[in-house]
Amino acid sequence: MQKSLGASKQRLLRSLFKILLGNLVMSFAYAKWMVPHQIINGGVTSIALILQRTTHLSVTLWTNLLTLSLLVVCAIFLGRENFFKSLYSSLTYLAGFNLFSAWSLTLAGSIWLDVPLASLAIAFGYYCCISENSSTVGVDVIALILHRYRPQLKIAPLIRDINFVVLGIGWFIFGWRSVLAGLAFSFIYAAILKKFLRE
């Protein structure tokens, strides 16, 4: 009995570490590559960029508000285990995003180099969370809910399609350059995530 409790505790600690690692990698990529280039890829940070441009409130404020709203949706539709892991996930993402956004280190260089780097980092972050029955409390919450009730719908393509809707809106606000980079990101990221998830 004690052995199984110890093994269970180890599994939980490994799971929490994987979620933490995924969110730190992902929040770094968003703060240092996606936001500086104003790349609209369809995620919560992209929606926050659109809202920031239309309301003049900060990207970090909108990211925090949207994440908390999606966390409530997660609690309602995805169950207790997913909610608690997603709560942990969202707190680590928000802490990382706020920390890396405030850090004066500049990494953004060529957008065409930064997009593949961000795609790999963000796909890895999503994989770390989804594989541990957690969401990133981004648009993946919507994809996970749709997948739960219609298992034939695959998670990576659902996230990509939601991203395309946000990209359409972003086109009118940020123009073709941000959206073209976002499209490239969405295709690369979805392909990498699909490989990670073995879908």
Image (cartoon, grey):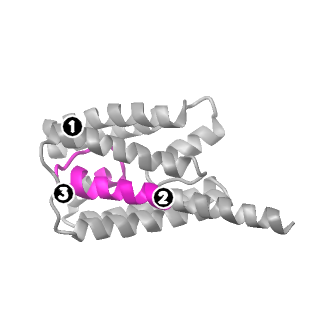
Helix, strand or loop status at disc 2: helix
Q: In which quadrant of the rendered view does residue 148 lie?
A: top right
Cα distance between the residues tagged 2 and 1:
25 Å
- The correct choice, above or below, for 96 with respect to 153 in the image is below
From the viewer's perspective, tell me whether residue 70 is left or right of residue 116: right
Per the rendered image, the range of residues in magenta is: 20-47
Q: Say which label, 1 or 3, has the lower sequence index.
A: 3
Cα distance between the residues tagged 1 and 3:
18 Å
Q: Main secondary structure of the magenta part?
A: helix
Helix, strand or loop status at disc 1: helix
Which residue was labeled with disc 1?
Answer: 181
- The correct choice, above or below, for 189 with respect to 101 in the image is above
Q: Is residue 73 visible?
A: yes
Quadrant position of the C terminus in the picture: top right
Q: Say which label, 2 or 1, has the lower sequence index.
A: 2
The amino acid type found where label 2 is placed reads Leu
From the viewer's perspective, tell me whether residue 158 is left or right of residue 147: left
The amino acid type found where label 1 is placed reads Ala
The amino acid type found where label 3 is placed reads Arg
Which residue was labeled with disc 3?
Answer: 53
Quadrant position of the N terminus in the picture: bottom right
From the viewer's perspective, tell me whether residue 16 is left or right of residue 94: right
- The correct choice, above or below, for 101 with respect to 50 in the image is below
The reply to whether callout 2 and callout 1 are in contact (CB within 8 Å) is: no
The reply to whether callout 2 and callout 3 are in contact (CB within 8 Å) is: no
Tell which of 60 and 198 is nearer to you.
198
Residue 48 percent coordinates (x, y): 29, 57
Which residue was labeled with disc 2?
Answer: 70
